[in-house]
Amino acid sequence: MISLQAIVDAVSLGGLYALAALGVALIFGVMRLINFAHGGLIMLSAYGLWLWSAYPVPLTILLTVGVAVVAALAMERVAFRPVRNADMSTLLVASFFVSSLLQNGWIGVYGSLGKSVSVFPGLLDRFDVAGLSIYRLDLVTLGTTAVLLATCSLVLTRTLIGLQIRAASENFVAARLLGVRADRVIPAAFAMSGVLAAPVAILLVARTGYVYPGIGLTPVLIAFLATVIGGMGNLLGAVAAGFVLGSLTTALQSFLPEAAAAYRDAFVFGGVLLVLVWRPGGLLPTKFEAERV
């Protein structure tokens, strides 16, 4: 029988994956680019927490989000805008290059050893609700996810730039004919991806108390899987797939025999493969068009 604790854990982890997936899906929507450099934004945000851990909490969060947004905008302007009209393989190589540059550049400055960092240690405390012991961090993760997803939904549906991003995701060629400017929409999508990368880093570091150069690799890989099985270009599908992957990961962690628990991720990837065999277009498929600016 599935316990309420397992459900809380699944939704909490799924929310973390959903935020990472939405950041990746936004960029794919406007550029047809799986931005693996999104993991670099998570890494920079995580190390920002380490650098500013002595500052007041609100200032630490503000600086972390600011660094992620500035890095995302710089990434778009320096690395991706010059090759915007290139084919998809070139864009993909560019994203790997930026990711490697960020990671190895940081290693060159601060070294490859991980750093212990204590941010919001009170979030690891438990409290009892109806006989159930719950981590405060799980509730904070759920609340943060709900607020950010609701905010993104409002931005995308109720603001001019949000409507332009959605139009560009559907068909950028037609959107440009209607007056949508690429040099405005694409940086806006990158800025939003930076805003989403920072909370992922904050929640990850709060969960583990540890930062290292590869901290963004697993979240961006999960985000890539969620983008694929959610339906390429479908933001709602990516979010839903993030929750599915979080639930599947938690369920396998709980129910796999001890001898097989080490192969949890292999089972997750196997489940993704089965989904794609069953529905090659993803859970919520869209009309995939290769046109870009």
Image (spheres, grey):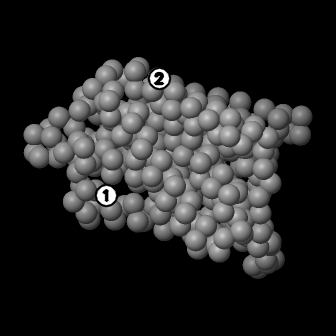
- The three-letter code of the residue at mark 2 reads Val
Residue 58 at what x, y percent from top left? 58, 73
Kindly report which numbered mark, 2 or 1, lies closer to the viewer in this rendering: 2
The span from disc 2 to disc 1 (Cα, nearest Å) is 29 Å
Residue visible at 25% across and 48% down?
A: 184
Q: Can residue 6 be seen in this view?
A: no
Residue 214 at what x, y percent from top left? 68, 38
The reply, left or right, for residue 106 in relation to residue 128 is left
Q: Is residue 63 visible?
A: yes
Residue 60 at what x, y percent from top left? 61, 67
Viewer-side residue, 217 vs 154: 217
Residue 156: numbered disc: 1
Circles 2, 1 touching at the beta carbon (< 8 Å):
no
Q: Is residue 61 above or below residue 163?
A: below
Label 1: which secondary element:
helix
The reply, left or right, for residue 150 in relation to residue 113 is left
Q: Mark 2 points at which residue?
A: 93
Label 2: which secondary element:
helix
- The three-letter code of the residue at mark 1 reads Leu
